[in-house]
Image: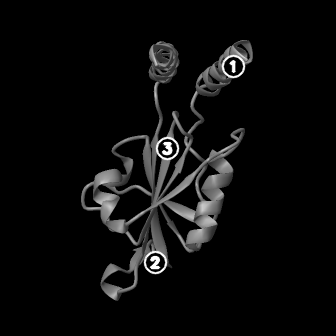
């Protein structure tokens, strides 16, 4: 029984290591039928981009899920309250929805949408009125950091298993 558990632990450890080793994917492609925003806040970093679009929230999320999920088995979708946008996207970001697509132990993609309900916030760019502005923030992680976390997790698991065995023998 112990031998089977050791083999399963070894296989799981290898699987986890192979999961975190590949490079992070590139920044997702722009939304179809959208115009990229070149406002200073939207171009100050290559990891954050803004787009004006008439797509619905569901269409936007589906587009980025398709772009971001390529080659991944499991990508959770987390929903945040819009009030979190200044902390997660950028200070003074207007928001009506905020979602995160996550590759656990790897990278995240935050999708913030602002649907202008009032004429004071109407989104007019080059004479075209848009339904909403979408800001996408990509948060990659360094390979060395991912490998270090997996290594420390494996070592910690081994130490805890040995301590549990010692504790069981005492009883």
Q: Residue at x 66, y 18 (%)?
A: 14
Residue at x 61%, y 70% (from the top left corner)? 58
Quadrant in the picture for the N terminus: top right
In the depicted structure, whether residue 52 falls above or below residue 46 = below
Above or below 78: residue 8:
above
Which residue lies under the disc numbered 2?
127
Relative placement, left or right, of 117 versus 15 is left
Q: Is residue 57 above or below residue 129?
A: above
Could you tell me residue 60's position as x and y percent?
59, 64
Give the spatial CA distance, label 3 vs label 2. 34 Å
The answer to whether residue 69 is left or right of residue 47 is right
Q: Position of residue 147 (x, y in %)?
A: 51, 19
Query: Do residues under tags 1 and 3 come within 8 Å of each other at their CB atoms?
Result: no
The mark that comes first in sequence, 3 or 2, is 3
Q: CA distance from mark 1 to mark 2?
A: 65 Å
The first of marks 1 and 2 along the sequence is 1
Tell me which residue sits at (59%, 62%) in the image.
Answer: 61
Q: Secondary structure at mark 1?
A: helix
In front: mark 1 or mark 3? Answer: 1
Q: CA distance from mark 1 to mark 3?
A: 32 Å
Q: Which residue is mark 3?
A: 108
Name the residue beneath numbered marker 1: 5
């Amino acid at each position: 029984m112990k031998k089977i558990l050791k083999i399963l632990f070894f296989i799981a450890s290898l699987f986890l290591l192979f999961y975190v080793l590949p490079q992070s994917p590139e920044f997702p492609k722009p939304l179809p039928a959208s115009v990229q925003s070149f406002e200073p806040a939207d171009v100050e970093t290559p990891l954050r981009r803004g787009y004006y679009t008439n797509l619905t929230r569901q269409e936007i999320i589906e587009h980025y899920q398709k772009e971001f999920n390529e080659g991944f088995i499991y990508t959770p979708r987390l929903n945040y309250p819009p009030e979190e946008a200044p902390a997660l996207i950028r200070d003074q970001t207007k928001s009506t929805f905020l979602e995160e697509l996550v590759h656990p132990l790897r990278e995240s993609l935050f999708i913030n949408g602002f649907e202008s309900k009032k004429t004071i916030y109407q989104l007019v760019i080059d004479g075209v009125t848009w339904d909403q502005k979408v800001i996408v923030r990509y948060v990659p992680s360094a390979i060395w950091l991912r490998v270090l976390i997996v290594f420390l997790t494996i070592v910690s698991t081994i130490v805890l298993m040995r301590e549990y065995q010692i504790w069981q023998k005492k009883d």
